[in-house]
Amino acid sequence: PVVPTSLVVTITPNVALGSPVFNADGTEAQFGPLSLLAGTQYSVTVNAADAQGRAATGERSSSFTTLAQVDSTPPTLVSSSPMTGAMN
């Protein structure tokens, strides 16, 4: 498990993450929701340690690019069941 105070997540360009929420085992942390810019490449680096002070090993960096255009079209309800006003 990760010591919560040892977790450092860096995102470039800078994104405000807020506080992480850890699962019961202390092996996963979630942040969100994030406000990401459209058409932007982001790099993420994660550093953490366990209770014995051992630093995380393995792949700790990743990158991704957001879509060029933000999807601002709201969803549309096509059908529902039971129909509105139906009686049993």
Image (cartoon, helix red, strand yellow):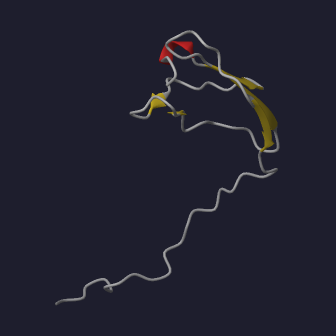
- Expressed as whole percent of the image width and height from the top left, the position of residue 50 reads 54, 17
Along the horizontal axis of the image, is 50 left or right of 84?
A: right
Q: Nearer the viewer, residue 57 or 6?
A: 57
Q: Quadrant of residue 38?
A: top right
Residue 51, given in percent of the width and then of the height, sits at 49, 13
The residue that appears at 52% across and 10% down in the rendered structure is 52
Q: Is residue 83 above or below residue 59?
A: below
Q: Nearer the viewer, residue 68 or 21?
A: 21
Q: Is residue 74 left or right of residue 21?
A: right
Residue 65: name its quadrant. top right
At x 78% / y 52%, what residue is drawn?
A: 69
Quadrant showing the C terminus: bottom left
Which residue is drawn at the image coordinates 46% and 28% (left, top)? 26
Identify which residue, 37 or 22, lies in the foreground.
22
Total residue callouts: 0
- Quarter location, residue 80: bottom left
Image position of 73 with respect to 19: above or below: below
The picture places residue 24, in percent across and down from the top left corner, at 38, 33
Quick one: which residue is furthest to the left in this view? Answer: 88
Q: In the image, is residue 21 above or below residue 37?
A: above
Going 77% across and 25% down the picture, which residue do you hit? 12
55 is higher (above) or lower (below) than 13? above
Q: Is residue 28 left or right of residue 83?
A: right
